[in-house]
Amino acid sequence: MSHGLAVAVVGAGNMGGGMLGRLCDLGWSVGVHDTDPQAQAKAVDLGAVPLDSAMQAAKSLSPHGVLLVAVVDAAQTEAVLWGEVGHGLGQGAGAHLQAGQAVMLCPTLAPDTVQSQAQRLSLRGVDCIDAPMSGGPLRARDGSMSLMVACSDVAWQRHQPVLNALSQQVFRVGTRAGDGARTKLVNNLLAAVNLVGSAEAMVLAERLGLDPATTLSVIEASSGQSWIGSDRMRRALADDFEPRAHVRLLAKDTGLAMQVAEAVAFEPVLGRLARNLFAQAMAQGLQDHDDAALLKLMRQGRD
């Protein structure tokens, strides 16, 4: 195995695959490891070098290479970096990373999780780039998604080329590990509130005898517009529930957002309602559906 890849991506699902595809399109040397053979094969077709494990991903990197972690949650992140048993992600990358390299954490994580991982990596001289993303797989692929980046000044300077390659909207939100995560949780709580409100508005339009698609067009040109509402409700009204962002993700993220809010003695009233509705969707077996399925939940009515 060549030891010169600029980026190794672990997790080539919707967002990870989109980012990987963008880097390959731009001519970057990229490796990939995913436990899903289909996701792995798709990434290789895009031009990525196949890697057998997270450990091999770390070993494949150039001296200033970046391990881009795009898995789902804290447990999978732990497995990728430190090889915990039981998550199917192979041997961990952390022990094989070198000073000057970086780990870019893209999942939505609790700030404490990011801080803990950053501390462990710093013992090896490895930069931690706290960099959750938002915008969906199509925007990940074309570079128009947002990246919320918290990292040291040294890491910012050293790894700015890959950040700028990944996104035209890179927001440096601070130097404190976890501030990217905090920003993402604030964003995702509002996204959940907006999505719930959009689904509720569509059902109200239907109950009033209005054409929901026409009503959505009016909303999109008026004060009720939101990006997530337009994106999800357009698909839902066309009965397109092909998963791009699963219900379980916003269920997780709203739960994390409410936890950090509680830690600072703040009670987001609408956020609590959104979290509870996503929990209800999970209880009804919608966890693996696209989160546009909130329209189905609203059509059923709620307690």
Image (tube, rainbow, N blue to C red):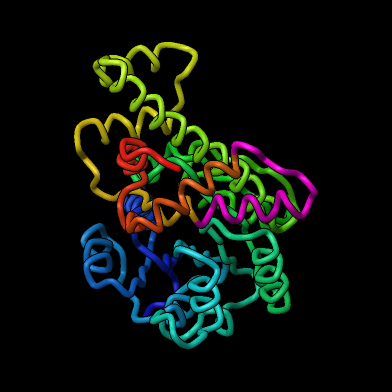
Residue situated in front as seen by the camera: 180 or 217: 217
Q: Residue at x 20, y 32 (%)?
A: 238
Instruction: Locate residue 5 relative to residue 164 in the image: left or right.
Output: left
Seen at 38% across and 62% down, the residue is: 29
> In the image, residue 67 lies at what x, y percent?
50, 67
Which segment is the magenta one?
A: 252-270
Q: Is residue 144 above or below residue 58?
A: above
Does 297 sit above or below residue 80? Answer: above
Question: What residue appears at the point 33 percent right and 37 percent down from the top-left corner?
Answer: 295
Q: Residue 66: x, y in percent?
A: 52, 64
Quarter-of-image position of residue 300: top left
Query: Of 135 and 165, which appears nearest the observer?
Result: 135
> Where residue 24 appears, x then y in whole percent?
33, 54
* The one of 131 and 269 positioned closer to us in this rendering: 269
Give the position of the C terminus as an image quadrant. Answer: top left
Query: Residue placed at 40% from the left, 16% from the top?
Result: 219
Q: Is residue 48 magenta?
A: no
- Image mark count: 0
Q: Is residue 267 above or below residue 199?
A: below
Residue 120: percent from the left, percent from the top? 69, 76
